[in-house]
Structures are given as structure tokens and as C-alpha cells.
Image (cartoon, rainbow, N blue to C red):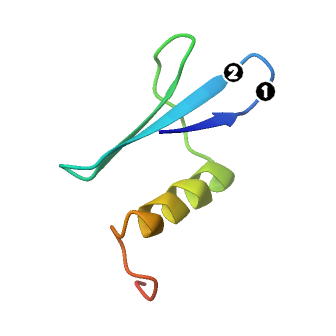
Amino acid sequence: MRTFLITKKERIDVIFYLKNKKIRAYYVENDEDVFIDMTLLKAINQQCKELDWIEENAR
């Protein structure tokens, strides 16, 4: 699980479910789903590469 601070009041958790290769991002304080911006998308993409879910040369 990765945690990202968007503002001082908001904390986002991103969970990588290894068995079914799914990702969930949500605000910790209210358990609402997160709209993913480019910074968070890049971090998720990097984590997927580290988990070997996507190839380095994938388009």
C-alpha cells in the first residue's frame, strides 16, 4: 500500500491487490474513491512496474 498526501487534510491510500491485479485508491478520512491526477497515475504506474504487472517496454 502506498500513501500520498494531497493536502494537509487529505490522505489517499492506494492498495494493490496482488492476486487479482486490481488497484483501489481512496480518501482515508471518508473512504470515498479518488479521482486520479497525473502525479498519482505516474506513481501507480511505477508501482505496477515494480510488481512486474506491466513490461517496461509496454505501450
Q: Which residue is mark 2?
A: 10
Q: Position of residue 52 (x, y in %)?
A: 36, 70
Q: Nearer the viewer, residue 17 or 32?
A: 17
For the C terminus, the image quarter is: bottom left
Point 60% across, 60% down: residue: 42
Q: Which residue is mark 1?
A: 7
* Vertical order, 10 against 15 (above or below): above
- For label 2, the SS is loop
Which amino acid does the dot numbered 1 rest on? Thr
- For label 1, the SS is loop
Q: For this view, does 9 lie left or right of residue 35?
A: right
Q: Position of residue 41 (x, y in %)?
A: 56, 55
Which amino acid does the dot numbered 2 rest on? Glu
Q: For this view, does 45 lie left or right of residue 40?
A: left
Q: For this view, does 38 lie left or right of residue 33?
A: right
Contact, CB < 8 Å: mark 1 with mark 2?
Answer: yes
